Amino acid sequence: MTRRWLFADQLGPHFLDRPDQAVLLVESSAVFARRRFHRQKAHLVLHALRTRARELGDQALFLQTRTYAEALAQVGETVDVVQPTTYAADRFVRDRGIDVLPERGFATTRAEFAGFAHDRKRLLLEDFYRWQRARFGLLMDGSEPTGGKWNYDHDNREPPPKALRLDIDEPWLAQEDDLDGEVRDDLDRLQRDGKAEFVGEDGPRWSASSRQDALLALDTFVRTRLAQFGPTEDAMLAADPWMAHSTLSPAINLGLLHPLECVEAAENAYRAGTAPLASVEGYIRQVIGWREYVYSIYWHVDDDYRSRNALEAHQPLPQWWRDLDHTRVTAHCLSGVLKDLAERGWVHHIPRLMVLGGWALQRGYDPAELTAWFHESFVDGYDWVMLPNVVGMSQHADGGLMATKPYASGGAYINRMSDYCGGCPYDPKKRLGPDACPYTAGYWAFLDRTQPHLQGNQRMAQPLANLARLKDLAQVVAQEHERGDAPP
Ligand code: SF4
């Protein structure tokens, strides 16, 4: 008999060939000794794994060991696996001659992406996204995109409304059960015994950790929030961390939901007339476009991608950043985002890219260290998702493979797309002086530092021309140099 070894991000029914298949689940503690995870992330993963073990009962052999190797030594049966999502796990199973089946947590297998990439000079997201839409028949009317356009980004970039919160129901939030208390006790014990160190606050657990709850969360999103998702998907409100986002990424990344069932539910809402096309297209683009693209790029490049550093960013991450210590940060946007991250292990894609990623880019944080930090600090963070998103998208460390220019901006972007600046002692328009916005000043200091690397980039020609006209550049650079790695 061959047992299906399910990793902790392969917990949905679609990872099994038949409902009564024999399963191996392994909870390894060694990973907590190696990395400092957000406590909520450790909690969620252990809860999801133990919930799956409880659901499967005798069908699953559930081993709690220090390492995977120790677990395998106890199994005494042949095991196979569905394609693991990381290089490290992939190497582990292949080195042991374990049978590896194609992906099931994604709509795109590595082989399919290789077919797409074959003979293409550039691997543009937009091409990939259209290919996905067409081959899955998503939002398609025959061979044409529904509504006549592939892309409704233009409708989906509105600033936030003049309100403290969106006028929208809360997302589905988990009710804790007896396993949550058990997991907390175990994590406390690991910490007390010096076998693990965590960051962030533990609880209450908000994400689904079972298939049943993940389906409830999906249904709630599609019924009550999807219609409003599009217009404000890039906006931030200090008092509304969820906005209209689905908050399903932890459940999808645990393998509890298949991405295709999420986008099909969204399309059904459009066809039923309960959600507008722009919102539905925006959501489908995130899931079947961006998420699948990032996963595919992760495997398309090689593992050396993590050491790329095209902008020569070598600053170590400061301790206040590592500790998510928002109390030491005065800048209202960064302090608010770090606080949300410490409390929930999650903020949506714009705080990630523009507030956290933007700060790190400006300050020259080491991209590999930053990738590990994002992986450890987010409840939905995994190597496959963070490596391309951080090294490629947010830090431009791959020299332009994923993004044609760095996602660098000053305080003006944050001011337009959020309500943070109103409550901030800094002024987003100022780059010099005690109330100079650190993002605005940092933007110019970043351009000054990286211009030798950006000179030939056509899309950076205008920003670099603006830089050349800045009369107070030397003072701005000196001011930001003086700030060093102190919290802003
Ligand atoms: Fe952030 Fe600058 Fe706005 Fe303050 S003024 S909230 S630091 S962007």
Image: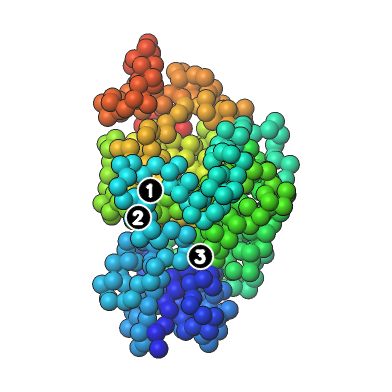
Query: In this picture, is 290 found above or below 182?
Result: above
Select label 3 or label 2 by which is in front. 2
Q: Residue furthest front?
A: 142
Q: Residue at x 43, y 47 (%)?
A: 128
Q: Earlier in the sequence, mark 1 or mark 3?
A: 3
Q: Label 3, label 2: how many angstroms apart (C-alpha)?
A: 25 Å
- The amino acid type, in three-letter code, at marker 2 is Gly
Numbered badge on residue 434? none
- The amino acid type, in three-letter code, at marker 3 is Gly
**Residue 207 location in percent, x, y?**
59, 60
Q: Residue at x 45, y 42 (%)?
A: 126
Query: In this picture, is 468 found above or below 163?
Result: above
**Residue 439 location in percent, x, y?**
46, 28
**Residue 182 location in percent, x, y?**
57, 73
Q: Earlier in the sequence, mark 3 or mark 2?
A: 2
Query: In this picture, is 221 found above or below 327?
Result: below
Select label 2 or label 1 by which is in front. 2
Determine which residue is flagged by label 2.
115
Tell me if mark 2 has few (under 14), some (14-19) or many (20+) residues whose alpha carbon lies within 10 angstroms of its own: few
Give the colouring mode of the picture. Answer: rainbow
Numbered badge on residue 388? 1
Determine which residue is flagged by label 3.
255
Quarter of the image where one finds residue 295: bottom left
Q: Label 1, label 3: how many angstroms apart (C-alpha)?
A: 20 Å
**Residue 384 location in percent, x, y?**
39, 55
- The amino acid type, in three-letter code, at marker 1 is Pro
Q: Residue at x 48, y 51 (%)?
A: 132
Tell me if mark 1 has few (under 14), some (14-19) or many (20+) residues whose alpha carbon lies within 10 angstroms of its own: many
Determine whether the residue tagged by mark 2 lies in a helix, strand or loop.
Answer: helix
Q: Is residue 118 left or right of residue 48?
A: left
Q: Earlier in the sequence, mark 2 or mark 1?
A: 2
